[in-house]
Amino acid sequence: MSGTRTIGALWRNAPGRGSTQPPYLAERGGAWVEVTWREAERRVDDIANGLLALGVRRGDAFSILASTTLEWCLFDFALGLIGAIGAPVYANSSPRDAAYVIRHSQAIGVLVEDDDQLAKVESVRAELPGLRHVLTFAGLNELEARGREHAAAHPTALADAEAAVGEDDVFTYIYTSGTTGPPKGCMIRHRNYYAMAAVVDKMPTRFVGPDDTLLLYLPLAHNYGRLIHLQARYVGYTLALCRDPLRVGDALAAVRPTNFPSVPRVYEKIHTAVVSGLDDAHGLRRTIAGWALAVGREVSRRRQAGEPIPRLLALRHRIADRLVYSKVKERLGGRLRLASSGGAPLSREVMQLFAALDLPIYEGYGLTECTTACSVNRPDAFKLGTVGRPLPGVEVRLAEDGELEMRSETVFAGYLEDEEATRQVLLEDGWLRTGDIAEIDAEGFITITDRKKDILVTAGGKNIAPQNLENDLKSSRYVSQAVVLGDRRPYVAALLTLDREEVAKWRADGGRDEAALVQGIVDEVNEHRSRYEQIKRFEVLPRDFSTEAGELTPTLKLRRRVVQEHFADAIERLYAL
């Protein structure tokens, strides 16, 4: 197996296995505790043997419904060792959404974190006739003990199972929102994730190394978080696992990471706090802050252009760091060497401020269908407003309509049980249609200019199909048109137009409170959806959309960009504090 690119081979033979740093920092009893390589390896073997004892075999799907935890990581590696297919579910998923993933993936089992997650599964158990095993974190000790017994009785069983796994076998199904229907299961092979983790070997300069500590709060059901967890083993860096995204600030101070992968929302919050602090400053303090930012902007400009930093400017920069930048860096633990952003676009305003504070955020771009990343900015090749140059081994090109297409070893195997959708994105020669409109400059930097597909990506990195929500809203006789918003925004909102004839009938029958009527419609649409997909605010517009105003095509399809331009004031009100 040492010559194959399987996740089992990554676990057994990765260069990072020899790291002297602890592989994990786990939260236990309110403290951060080091987990040794020996403990992690023993537990993975025991879990893998325990799964074999349950009858789990190569090709069986098994779900994980939990937050970002050590148990999630170890169970994932155990599934990879025996060739079972992980089918992860977001911890904040509704029972309905969890049931969909478990049912569609034909998972024979699910690991749940606690009683709350167990209750979700139990509430939909009748819809899951193929589900044979429901395991809990609390019951992992029992599973591991069973695994040790199985290993004693069948000493070659695990090695035999590992040897049967091939690099073209499916390692995981990662579910991503479709534009008009239910989520699609991306089939990602062992070699796809192995190649993605190993791309660090081909980077011209160091991006991450075995002496780094990464704080991970991102969900492991998402491709970005999954890559970081797998790459931790490959590279050998320490992975600090934060199960509660709301406690990231405390975790940064306690863990003091050198690298911090995030989605834009966390950086936006820090940006808001910094700007507020600068606005509140007066006198000498305000003058010093303004001077430091001016120095930082000039240094950032020169670095991006590849120009040398003059000695006097370098001296000013060191002074500015001591007086201003270091104060912001302390909020991120004080040791941060590299901050990265993905999952959703990051605004230029935020990036400019962080770069001026000597904390450049290296934004990347990718999608689940290419096993996380296609391109990334990096310390030696960085340009604000772009998503960087293609990763080593990634080819990119633009179609006639400007759509970005890419090809690499990381391109997925297709969508589970959906050949038509697979044909729409995978071309015969191995190129993947990304669904995003882009520009590529003379230096190879990629800029995403528009979204060909209508998927919304919130500031928290969640993918949401607006048509699903819009269609449900329009199923009410009182709603004429609906536009769901949320791209790069902190939450989902909606613009609604009402069918005035139906509303008039409602009033004639004694209806009085129109706002309550619409709120009831929105509440019904939200009822069975996960929290991140629920509509938080809405506004009823004074008129319907029309072809004359250019808001609808001749075939009455919605022109989202035009609607958002025409009703920009209403949208700003929806996101006003």
Image (cartoon, helix red, strand yellow):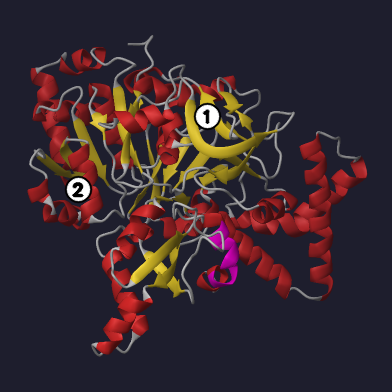
Q: Is residue 548 above or below residue 436?
A: below
The verdict on residue 33 being magenta is: no
The residue sitting at 54% across, 68% down in the picture is 571
Q: Residue 18 or 554: which is nearer the viewer? A: 554
Q: Is residue 140 visible?
A: no
Magenta residues, as a range? 562-570
The residue sitting at 34% across, 60% down in the picture is 531
In which image quadrant can residue 291 be found? bottom right
Crowding near the residue tagged with mark 1, few <14, some 14–19, many ≥20 C-alpha atoms within 10 Å = many
The residue sitting at 80% across, 70% down in the picture is 286
List x then y, in percent, for residue 122.
12, 53
List x then y, in percent, for residue 365.
55, 38
Is label 2 or label 1 in front? 2
Secondary structure found at label 1 = loop
Main secondary structure found in the magenta portion: helix
Q: Residue 285 or 276: which is nearer the viewer? A: 276
- The CA span between labels 2 and 1 is 39 Å
Instruction: Name the amino acid type tagged 1.
Output: Pro
Residue at the outermost top position: 3
Determine which residue is flagged by label 1: 210
Q: Residue 242 or 303: which is nearer the viewer? A: 303
Is 124 on the left or on the right of 535, as rendered?
left
Q: Is residue 120 above or below residue 520?
A: above
Q: Quadrant of the N terminus?
A: top left
In which image quadrant can residue 149 be found? top left
Secondary structure found at label 2 = helix
Instruction: Name the amino acid type tagged 2.
Output: Ala
Is 467 on the left or on the right of 541, as rendered?
left
List x then y, in percent, for residue 82.
23, 22
Determine which residue is flagged by label 2: 99
Crowding near the residue tagged with mark 2, few <14, some 14–19, many ≥20 C-alpha atoms within 10 Å = many
Q: Quadrant of the C terminus?
A: bottom right
